[in-house]
Each structure stands twice: as structure tokens, then as C-alpha cells.
Image (cartoon, rainbow, N blue to C red):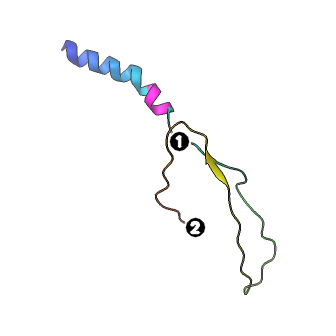
Amino acid sequence: MFMRKFFLLAFLFLFPAISYSQPSLTFDTENYDFGIVAQSDTIEHTFEFSNKGDKELIIKKLVPS
């Protein structure tokens, strides 16, 4: 019984520290206006971003919206 309480208290004290240390993706600009584009035009834009968090950021999949 004592060990169960000990682990529960240890978890409750450590949980906030674990939950706050995470990656944080920050974009320089979140959108870009291409203006009027003809169907035959090739357009591109590079979105710059950085990880402002304190954990490694891993991007597994990108999906256009």
C-alpha cells in the first residue's frame, strides 16, 4: 500500500515537468498571398519555421489543406 502511494505521489509531482517539456513549432509567417495566378503558372513559396520548444521536433507527415 505504501509503495502504491509513493508511486502515485511521484507521478503527480513529475507529471507537470514531463507535460511542459515538448516541441513547439513556430512559423515566421503562417500564410502567404500568391495573388492572382494563371492555371499554367508554376508558383512556389518557402515557409520558414523553427522549433522553439525544449524537445526534439519530428515531422512524420505533411498534408496540404
Q: Which numbered dot is residue 64?
A: 2
- As helix, strand or loop, the secondary structure at mark 1 comes to loop
Q: Find residue 5 and report its image quarter.
A: top left
Residue occupying image coordinates x 46% and y 26%: 17
Q: In this view, does 11 lie above or below 58?
A: above
Residue lying furthest bottom = 40
Q: In terms of depth relative to the viewer, which is nearer, 54 or 35?
A: 54
Q: Where is residue 62 in the image (x, y as percent from the top left)?
A: 52, 62
Q: Mark 1, residues whose alpha carbon is within 10 Å: few (<14), some, or many (≥20)?
A: some
Residue lying furthest top = 2
Q: Find residue 10 and report its image quarter.
A: top left
Q: Where is residue 41 in the image (x, y as percent from the top left)?
A: 74, 83
Residue occupying image coordinates x 21% and y 16%: 3
Q: Name the amino acid, label 1.
A: Pro
Left or right, 3 with respect to 36, comes to: left
Q: Counting residues from the N terminus, which is met first, the one under dot 1 or under dot 2?
A: 1
Q: Where is residue 40 in the image (x, y as percent from the top left)?
A: 73, 87
Q: Name the amino acid, label 2.
A: Pro
Left or right, 8 with respect to 62, comes to: left
- As helix, strand or loop, the secondary structure at mark 2 comes to loop
Q: Is residue 36 above or below residue 17?
A: below
Q: Quadrant of the N terminus?
A: top left
The residues tagged by marks 1 and 2 sit, at their Cα atoms, a distance apart of 21 Å
Residue occupying image coordinates x 72% and y 59%: 31
Left or right, 61 with respect to 48, comes to: left
Q: Mark 2, residues whose alpha carbon is within 10 Å: few (<14), some, or many (≥20)?
A: few
Mark 1 lies on residue: 23
Segment tinted magenta in the rendering: 16-20
Q: Is 8 one of the magenta-colored residues?
A: no
Q: In terms of depth relative to the viewer, which is nearer, 31 or 45?
A: 45
Q: In terms of depth relative to the viewer, which is nearer, 59 or 33?
A: 59
